[in-house]
Amino acid sequence: MRIVLQRVAKASVTIDGKITASIDRGLLVFVGIEHSDTREDVMWLVRKIVQMRIFSDTDNKMNLSITEIGGDMLIVSQFTLHASTKKGNRPSFIGAAPPHIAKPWYELFLQSLEGEMEGHVLSGEFGADMQVSLINDGPVTIFMDSNNKT
């Protein structure tokens, strides 16, 4: 499971010209699921995201987590995080799990975050064509892969 986590001042998802989810201060998380992902991968990423200290404290040091600032999360499924660019100029997405495998893991990811968060956990629509808008705060952008836990 791969994620791109961005600290945002604002973020939103638009589907068919309508804003379907939006947050103010918090995290925008893009999630890519692969064939070999497990419950352990989901839970490891959930814990890391919720506990990650990337928000500024009163001394302007990144020392606070999303829960400590009372922020919200916007989660967006993005199979392209598993793009392979080794050969040619067209990326291959063979490493991404097909929807019937990925969607249950995505839903578990959302439910697990909701259980760990005090703020709101909103999401885009799995498999939809989405337009994502954001104001990256910092900018702070972090890539994580559950295959690199150790």
Image (cartoon, rainbow, N blue to C red):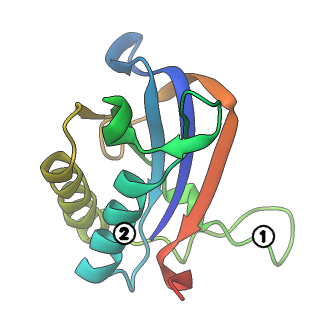
Q: Which mark is residue 112?
A: none
- Residue 75: in sight, yes or no? no
Decide: few, some or many residues near mark 2? Use Cα within 10 Å; few <14, some 14-19, many ≥20.
some
> How many numbered marks have been drawn onto this rendered protein structure?
2
C-alpha gap between disc 2 and disc 1: 19 Å
Verify CB contact (< 8 Å) between mark 2 and mark 1: no
Give the residue type that dot 2 points to: Pro
Image coords of residue 83 (percent x, y): 65, 66
| In this view, 114 is above or below 73 | below
Give the position of the C terminus as an image quadrant.
Answer: bottom right
Give the residue type that dot 1 points to: Thr
Circle 2 SS class? loop
Residue holding disc 1: 85
Q: Nearer the viewer, residue 78 or 4?
A: 4
Image coords of residue 44 (percent x, y): 35, 73
Decide: few, some or many residues near mark 1? Use Cα within 10 Å; few <14, some 14-19, many ≥20.
few
Identity of the residue drawn at 57% across and 40% down: 6
Circle 1 SS class? loop
Identity of the residue drawn at 41% across and 63% down: 48
Residue holding disc 2: 98
Image coords of residue 101 (percent x, y): 27, 72
| In this view, 85 is above or below 135 | below
Image coords of residue 128 (percent x, y): 37, 38
Identity of the residue drawn at 63% across and 53% down: 142
Identity of the residue drawn at 19% across and 52% down: 116
